[in-house]
Amino acid sequence: MLLWHYTHGANIIALVKSGVILSDVENVLPEDEKGPVWFSKNQEWEQTVKKTAIWKPDFPLMTFTELVKELGAYRIGVKPSTAPISYRELVKLRPSTAGLAKLGKEYGGNPRDWFVSLEPVPREKWVAVQVCKNFRWVGYDGSPPVFSPQVKLALAARECLIAA
C-alpha cells in the first residue's frame, strides 16, 4: 500500500518541475518548527485537501467532485517508509500540531490516515504520480491541467497578489 500526497492542478506542475514535495503548513506552526510533509493512507482521496472556489460568490469550499472538475485532483504516492510518522506520533513530537485533528475531522478527514515526513520528499522517493480522470486514478503523463476561463483568471489574480 502506498501513502499519498494529494494535491490539485494549480500545484502539480510546480511539484513535478521542482521534483520535491515541501511542507504546505509552515504558516500555521511556530517559527522554530519546520512543517511536516503530509500523506494519507486513504486510497481514494484525503478530505482535508480543501480548496476555496475564489471565483464563486461567498468563496465556498469545493467538494471533491468540484475540485476534480474545476482544478483537477492529483496525487503522489510513496512507500510508507518515506513518511513513517503517524499523526499520533507527530503530536508527541510537535504538540503545536494537535489542533489539526479537530479541523481535519470537520472536513471529513481521519487522523488515523495521516502520516508525515519531517523532511522534504524528493522525486527519487516518489513511486507514482496520478491524476483523477473520470473519477478514476490513472498515471499522470505530465500534461498541464485544463482550467475554465474563470479559474484561470482567479489563479492569475492569486499569482499577482503573491508577487506583490
Image: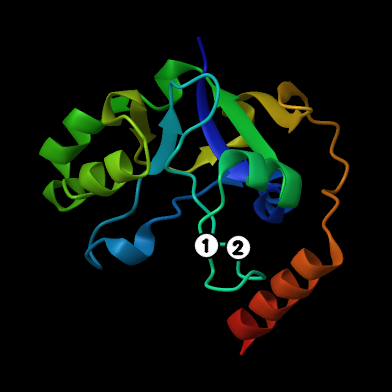
Outermost bottom residue:
164
Residue that numbered label 2 is attached to: 53
Image location (x, y in percent) of residue 61: 51, 56
Eyeballing the image, is 162 above or below 125? below
Image location (x, y in percent) of residue 122: 57, 37
Q: Is residue 24 left or right of residue 162?
A: left
User: Element type at marker 2?
Assistant: loop
Eyeballing the image, is 114 above or below 99? above
Image location (x, y in percent) of residue 29: 26, 61
Mark 2 and mark 1 in contact (Cβ < 8 Å)? yes
User: Element type at marker 1?
Assistant: loop
**Mark 1 burial class by Cα count in 10 Å: few <14, some 14-19, many 20+:** few
| Mark earlier in primary sequence (1, 2) | 2
Outermost top residue:
1
* Residue 137 shows in the view: yes
Q: Which mark is residue 83?
A: none
Q: CA distance from mark 1 to mark 2?
A: 6 Å
Q: Is residue 145 left or right of residue 107?
A: right
Residue that numbered label 1 is attached to: 60
**Mark 2 burial class by Cα count in 10 Å: few <14, some 14-19, many 20+:** some
Which quadrant holds residue 159? bottom right
Quadrant of the snapshot with the C terminus: bottom right
Q: Is residue 31 left or right of residue 148?
A: left
Please name the amino acid that badge 1 sits on: Pro
Residue at 72 percent across and 21 percent down: it is 136
**Residue situated in front as seen by the camera: 139 or 55:** 55
Residue at 28 percent across and 24 percent down: it is 112
Residue at 18 percent across and 30 percent down: it is 88
Image location (x, y in percent) of residue 2: 52, 16
